[in-house]
Image: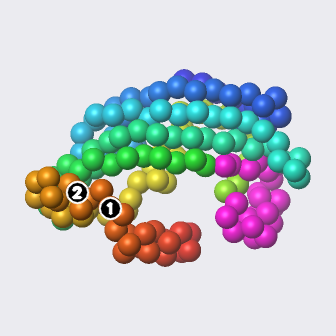
């Protein structure tokens, strides 16, 4: 378990990386079909052109989710890169998010538990209602599943707007 000062880590342009077993992240493990897989992560600090400290968290991994249609496991690929801009107080965070709706803000945290941050970001990446593109699991179905479903993409956009 790593604990960092989020703003100092950013200003010193530090980086950390590692891997956490899914089984060690209880809130994530609850959402998975089984305990297989691990989150590979890399955290890099920096300061943006407005002199705001930020963290870039990159996550990859492969897990088994439960298909909400047939209730069988389905492989799911995690790939997320979050840029978390840090603010000293709630008010400046709200102002910045009001100006830039793509901005993902966080408050400066002197004792940031990196594992908790990673688990939070993985949970945000999980699909709301995972489904096989075609349930059944033969090779033809697997091929269909590999193509992105335009309706799923659309649903993702709508979800983002609602946030
Ligand atoms: Zn299914």
Give the vertical position of 112 relative to 103 (above or below): above
Q: Residue at x 44, y 35 (%)?
A: 39
Q: Is residue 94 left or right of residue 58?
A: right
Foreground of the two, 81 or 11: 81
Structure colour scheme: rainbow
Q: Position of residue 2 (x, y in %)?
A: 60, 25
Foreground of the two, 59 or 9: 59
Q: CA distance from mark 2 to mark 1?
A: 7 Å
Q: Residue at x 79, y 50 (%)?
A: 87
Q: Quadrant of residue 102?
A: bottom right
Q: Looking at the image, do the residues carrying marks 2 and 1 touch, with CB atoms under 8 Å apart?
A: yes
Q: Quadrant of the C terminus?
A: bottom right
Give the vertical position of 39 relative to 104 (above or below): above
Give the vertical position of 15 relative to 121 (above or below): above
Q: Residue at x 27, y 47 (%)?
A: 75
Q: Position of residue 80 (x, y in %)?
A: 52, 48
Within the magenta stretch, is there residue 26?
Answer: no
Q: Quadrant of the N terminus?
A: top right
Label 2 C-beta lies within 8 Å of the nearest ligand 1 atom: no
Q: Is residue 112 left or right of residue 81?
A: right
Q: Which residue is mark 1?
A: 147
Q: Quadrant of residue 108?
A: top right
Q: Can residue 24 be seen in this snapshot?
A: no
Q: Which residue is mark 2?
A: 143
Give the vertical position of 123 relative to 58 (above or below): below
- Total tally of numbered discs in the picture: 2
Helix, strand or loop under label 1: loop
What range is drawn magenta here?
Answer: 83-103
Foreground of the two, 106 or 73: 73
Helix, strand or loop under label 2: helix
Q: Position of residue 38 (x, y in %)?
A: 39, 32
């Amino acid at each position: 378990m790593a604990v960092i000062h989020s703003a100092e880590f950013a200003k010193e342009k530090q980086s950390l990386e590692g891997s956490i077993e899914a089984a060690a992240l209880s809130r994530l493990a609850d959402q998975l079909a089984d305990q297989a897989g691990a989150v590979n992560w890399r955290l890099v600090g920096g300061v943006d052109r407005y002199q705001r400290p930020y963290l870039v968290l990159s996550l990859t991994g492969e897990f088994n989710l439960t298909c909400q249609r047939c209730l069988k496991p389905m492989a799911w690929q995690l790939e997320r890169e979050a840029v978390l801009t840090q603010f000293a107080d709630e008010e400046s965070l709200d102002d910045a998010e009001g100006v830039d709706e793509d901005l993902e803000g966080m408050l400066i945290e002197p004792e940031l538990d990196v594992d908790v941050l990673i688990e939070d970001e993985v949970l945000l990446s999980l699909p709301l209602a995972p489904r096989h593109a075609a349930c059944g699991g033969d090779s033809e179905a697997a091929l269909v599943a590999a193509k992105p479903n335009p309706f799923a993409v659309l649903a993702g956009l709508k979800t983002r707007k609602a946030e």
